[in-house]
Amino acid sequence: MAIQPGIAGTSVIKRMYQNDNENLRSRLYWQCRRGMLELDCLLQDFLESGYETLSIAELQAFQDLLSYPDPLLLEYVMGRMQPSDRAIADVVAKIRCTVTD
């Protein structure tokens, strides 16, 4: 079934986007639950306060960051190490900025 142009079609598209966005946010929330309480707090706080500000590229970098092992991730968000990937480094900086504000 094709979506009809106009107001009804626009609202359907908006609902689909909102549902996809909420599903992604839920998946990210569970990925932010780590084996270290410190990381749980930092990442979940960032997700709550900084998620809406992320661009598509930053969102992808955040997802990539969540695939890192906990000890390395902790070093990055605590500022003891700097990621070599620029996009990851930018997201880490946003996490640090959001959490320290």
Image (cartoon, rainbow, N blue to C red):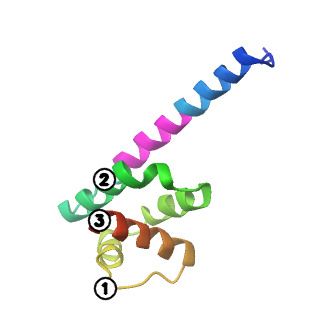
User: Circle 3 is placed at which residue position?
Assistant: 101
Q: Nearer the viewer, residue 48 or 85?
A: 48
Task: Give me the residue at 55% from left, 35% from top.
Answer: 20
Identify the amino acid type marked 1. Answer: Arg
What secondary structure is the stretch in magenta mostly built from? helix
Bounds of the magenta span?
A: 20-31
* Magenta span includes 41: no
Q: Estimate how packed mark 1 is, as few (under 14), some (14 to 19) or many (20 or more) residues with alpha carbons within 10 Å.
A: few
Which part of the image, by quadrant, shows the N terminus? Answer: top right
**Residue beneath label 2, please?**
44
- Residue 60 position by quadrant: bottom right
Mark 2 surroundings within 10 Å by alpha-carbon count, few (fewer than 14), some (14 through 19), many (20 or more)? some
Is 19 left or right of 34, judged from the image as shown?
right
Q: Residue furthest left?
A: 37
Q: Is residue 27 above or below residue 8?
A: below
Sequence-first tag of 2 and 1: 2
Residue mark closest to the camera, 3 vs 1: 3
Disc 3 or 1, which lies upstream in sequence?
A: 1
Q: Which quadrant holds the C terminus?
A: bottom left
Q: Is residue 27 magenta?
A: yes
Amino acid at circle 3: Asp
Image spot of residue 80 (x, y percent): 31, 85
The residue that appears at 52% across and 56% down in the rendered structure is 54
Mark earlier in primary sequence (3, 2)? 2
Q: Say if mark 2 contacts mark 1, CB within 8 Å.
A: no
Total label count?
A: 3
- Amino acid carrying label 2: it is Gln
Q: Which residue is mark 1?
A: 80
Q: Position of residue 3 (x, y in %)?
A: 77, 18
Q: Nearer the viewer, residue 69 or 99?
A: 99
